[in-house]
Image (cartoon, rainbow, N blue to C red):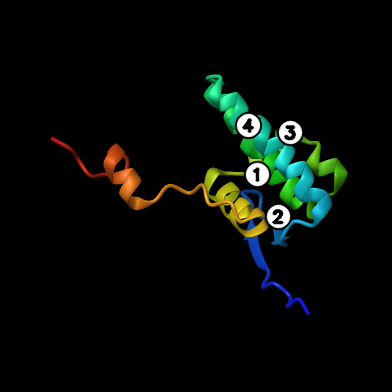
């Protein structure tokens, strides 16, 4: 017998609260199709903004039940309401995909305030 997963709440930039749930099979299939497309595009040197669009698409697939069709289709609202940290949490909690950079990676890239001489 399956145990209920612990649910996580996130608050978007506009103070909308969403409850994050693991993807059901239907949404998992949509997620995998978009994920595969994103990976293929990245291999072909897709522009950074195309990759950002793909991350937003993946997050929307994950929370589409919570958002409803009208909000899920409102790209302006999505871009105003989402940030990268929230997208990373959504992908981790709903699809078990961890894209958040680790401190070690950020340190190596010099992006955490550490200076490299």
Q: Which residue is more in the foreground, 64 or 15?
A: 64
Classify 66 as above or below 106.
Answer: below
Rendered location of residue 19, percent (x, y): 72, 63
Numbered mark located on residue 16 in the image: 2
Residue 79 visible in this rendered orientation of the protein: no
Q: Residue at x 79, y 57 (%)?
A: 24
First in sequence, mark 4 or 2: give its number.
Answer: 2
Q: Residue at x 83, y 50 (%)?
A: 26
SS of the residue under disc 3: helix
Check disc 4: other Cα within 10 Å, few if <14, some if 14-19, many if 20+: many
Numbered mark located on residue 81 in the image: 1
SS of the residue under disc 1: helix
Q: Are marks 1 and 2 in contact (CB under 8 Å)?
A: yes
**Looking at the rendering, which quadrant does residue 25 occupy?**
bottom right
Q: Are marks 1 and 4 in contact (CB under 8 Å)?
A: no
| Camera-nearest label, 1 or 4 | 4
């Amino acid at each position: 017998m399956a145990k209920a997963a612990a649910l996580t709440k996130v608050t978007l930039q506009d103070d909308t609260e969403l409850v994050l749930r693991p993807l059901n099979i239907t949404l998992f299939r949509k997620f995998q199709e978009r994920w595969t497309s994103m990976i293929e595009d990245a291999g072909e040197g897709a522009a950074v903004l195309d990759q950002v669009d793909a991350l937003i698409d993946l997050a929307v697939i994950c929370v589409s039940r919570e958002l409803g069709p009208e909000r899920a289709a409102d790209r302006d609202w999505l871009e105003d309401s989402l940030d990268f940290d929230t997208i990373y949490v959504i992908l981790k909690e709903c699809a078990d995909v961890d894209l958040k950079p680790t401190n070690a990676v950020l340190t190596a890239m010099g992006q955490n305030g550490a200076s490299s001489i």
